[in-house]
Image (cartoon, grey):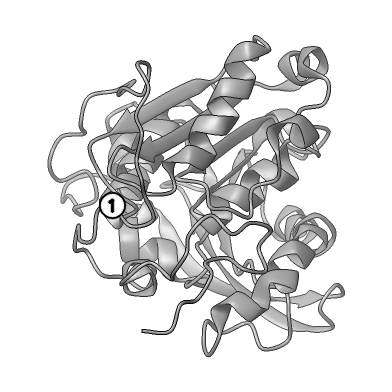
Amino acid sequence: MKPLPIFLMLAATFLPTAPPNLFAQERGARSEEPRGFGGPIVLNEDDKPAFPEPPAGIDVKREGIPHGRLEMIEYDSRTVGTTRRMQVYTPPGYTTDEKYPVLYLLHGIGGDETEWQRFASPDILLDNLIADGKAVPMIIVMPNGRAQKNDRAEGDVFASAPAFANFERDLLDDVIPTIESRYSTYNDREHRALAGLSMGGGQSLNFGLTHLDTFAWIGAFSAAPNTKPPAELVPDPAATTEQLELLFLSCGNQDGLIHISQGMHAYLKEHDVPHVWHVDEHGHDATHWRNSLYHFAQMLFE
């Protein structure tokens, strides 16, 4: 097989060849294999779970509880110069008589606005958490993080690296204003969260930590090599600490990209920036991302 540097245009060359089945994983495969692509995996003493494994059925639809609504909407992106799509979940009992916080949830390099729905069914997961009194009713927005006119995950997905970086402007200038004009939301940083898986985890750190005037809650689940250096994202640890409500980092101990999250964790720990560091027994896979969302959602907007 011809070697292909992973995330070649996403800022780093951490892996010598493309990880087998990475895109199958990001396009909906539930398989746990291969669990250790990219390695070598070197675990540190504090690379441990912060939470127990979730109970079975966290994303199984339950009868006898209220359900929210999942819809696909279109919006005009001035950043891209075209009409784009995103999925929006509104919680059970949504009404314009109340205001709601918003979680912006980003996908991986091989995905699109439908990827989270294939991996974790966030609408069902949140319906269940809200019914159990474990999560605040919130709106979840799942946009397409590939800010270019052809935003489909096709062909050489690595070639979309500039579009993934350009999504910063689409998110701030087009996605958020659209949501806040069409839905009944709180429009302040204390009621906005940003999180994502893999490449979307890197985007969440890159965009969230450099726009703490917009987001107070940030989550990165197995962040990919597009993640910028910690010192660049957190140049003033004291200021970051003062502004953040929550910084959540997670990765599986079978994930060959764990060194990226470990590096961020080590920097934050060294500079006394409070954060959650959760390392479970999974790989770079849908189970880790689903479980991380389950834990993260329960901590939001409290």
The image quadrant that residue 293 belongs to is top left
**Residue of label 1:** 36
Residue 159 or 137: which is nearer the viewer?
A: 159
Residue 196 or 36: which is nearer the viewer?
A: 36
**Is residue 239 placed above or below 187 in the rendered structure?**
above
> Residue 22's spot in the image, x, y percent?
37, 68
Residue 223 in view (yes/no): yes
> Residue 214's spot in the image, x, y percent?
79, 38
Residue 55 or 92: which is nearer the viewer?
A: 55
Q: Label 1 sits on what residue type?
A: Gly
**Is residue 216 placed above or below 192 in the rendered structure?**
above
Looking at the image, the residue that sits furthest to the left is: 56
> Residue 81's spot in the image, x, y percent?
84, 83
Where disc 1 sits, the SS reads: loop
Q: In the rendered image, which quarter contains the N terminus? A: bottom left
Pointer 1 local density, CA inside 10 Å: few below 14, some 14–19, many at least 20 = many
Residue 67 in view (yes/no): no
Residue located 56% across and 32% down the image: 263
Residue located 32% across and 71% down the image: 20
